[in-house]
Image: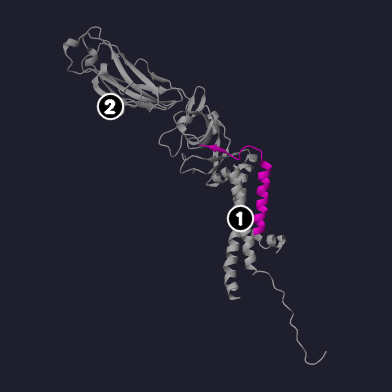
Amino acid sequence: MNLLSFVGRSGVRRAGLFLTLAASAALTLGAGASTLALFTDTQDSTAAFSTGTIDLTASPSTVFTASGIFPGASGSQTVTVANAGTGALRYAMSTSATNADGLGLATQLQLTITAGTCPGAGGPLYGAAALGSAGFGNAAQGAQAGDRTLAGAASEDLCLAWSLPSTTGDAFQGAATTATFTSAAEQTTNNP
Amino acid sequence: MTSRVVLAKPIRALRRLIDLAFLGLALVVLAALILARGIQLTGRSTFVVSGPSMEAAVHQGSAIVVEPVTAGDIRVGDVVTMRVGPEQAIFTHRVVRIAQRPDGLWLETKGDANATPDPVLVPATAVIGRVRLTIPAIGYVIAALSISNGLLLGGGLAGMLLALVLLLEGLETGGPTRRREPETTRLPGGA
């Protein structure tokens, strides 16, 4: 048996040998060039997506102004909380209220915080309970109950609804308070 | 004699099978090379998927052909390949949200098999292109051909198959051929 008869005996073999020749030529011609293909997803994604910004904003900056109100009055405002950064963040809210006249109006006023545009949807995130203690989540580092998350360039609405109970007594006449809502954010990347 | 006849058919069948296997091997290697080298001539790029984050749409070990795309043409649901982070690692994930920021378009991406989206948005400028074609398993072949051990394996396999075929053909034809004496008829009497 000679080489020619070995090659020529089978059409399938001829095709196979021809393709092997073509493949070897392609490999030889490409030799010395960079690797044949680049690899995608070689790293753990959390480690790779590591550079970003977080930037929490809330608007409107003045949520309510109510003056000369009587027991039974109420009001609400939709607050838009936004992350203007590129990385996901986690935030908590807390309130500090003044009590210059010592009448404790901040404790008497009730606040309810609900997710979504007013009137909001789902169970309350806070309340109805004292305005002065209003908030959700925990500003301490790490994920705690009540903390809310916002992806980069995302926003959400919260409904803040206040009321002065109709049972409010004469002791609160002329009372005033200023409440400041503070939202504290932290990154979620590498910070479970 | 009978034993030879009985063996001839299965030997031929095996020989044909190995001829086909050899052809198959050559086809697979050539296909891998066309993907790895030839595709670049069309302006597209081929990548090997080495992670499982896009299962089941894109399997680990697949080769993907990626076509350049302008930022404005990217749509939610597109699977895009992008460079990410300080090390410019290459990732292929699905676009789940497009965000317009003052500094341009940014994408929120997520691997189909991941529970949560990727932790940081990616600028649309980091996108290499959109996945147009996914071919399972051949990524492994491309990766193998990229290393010397893989080339050795391929070459060795091809050589082995050819040697096997040569051996089997020898057995098929039944060993060394015997010259037969032409039949002579002796006539009675003298010449």
Q: Which chain carries label 1?
A: B
**Within the image, what quadrant is residue B131 found in?**
top right
Q: Name the chain letter of the residue that bears numbered label 2.
A: A
Where, quadrant-wise, is the N terminus of chain A in this rendering?
A: bottom right
Q: Is residue A21 magenta?
A: yes
- The residues colored magenta run A13-41
Q: Nearer the viewer, residue B39 or A131?
A: B39
Spatial CA distance of label 2 from label 1 is 73 Å
Q: Residue drawn at (62%, 60%), measured in percent from left and top?
A: B165
Residue A8 pos. (x, y %): 69, 61
Instruction: Decide: few, some or many residues near mark 1? Use Cα within 10 Å; few <14, some 14-19, many ≥20.
Output: few
* Tag 2 and tag 1, C-beta contact below 8 Å: no
Determine which of the numbered discs, if any, sits on residue A124 in the image: 2
Identified by mark 1, the residue type is Met
- Where B81 sits versus A120, above or below? below
Residue kind at label 2, given as amino acid type: Pro
* Left or right of B3 on screen, residue A11: right
Q: Which residue lies furthest to the top in this view?
A: A101
Which residue corresponds to mark 1?
A: B160
Answer above or below: position of A128 versus B149: above
Position of residue A9 measured from the top left corner of the image (x, y, whole percent): 68, 63
How would you classify the magenta stretch by its main secondary structure?
helix
Give the residue displayed 65% in from the left and 65% down from the top.
Answer: B170
Taking A171 as reference, is A147 left or right? Answer: right
Q: Nearer the viewer, residue A88 or A172?
A: A88
Horizontally, residue B93 falls left or right of residue A35, namely left
Instruction: Name the residue at 63% across, 57% down.
Output: B162
- Per the image, is A160 magenta? no
Residue B76 higher or lower than A178, as above or below: below
- Under circle 2, the secondary element is strand
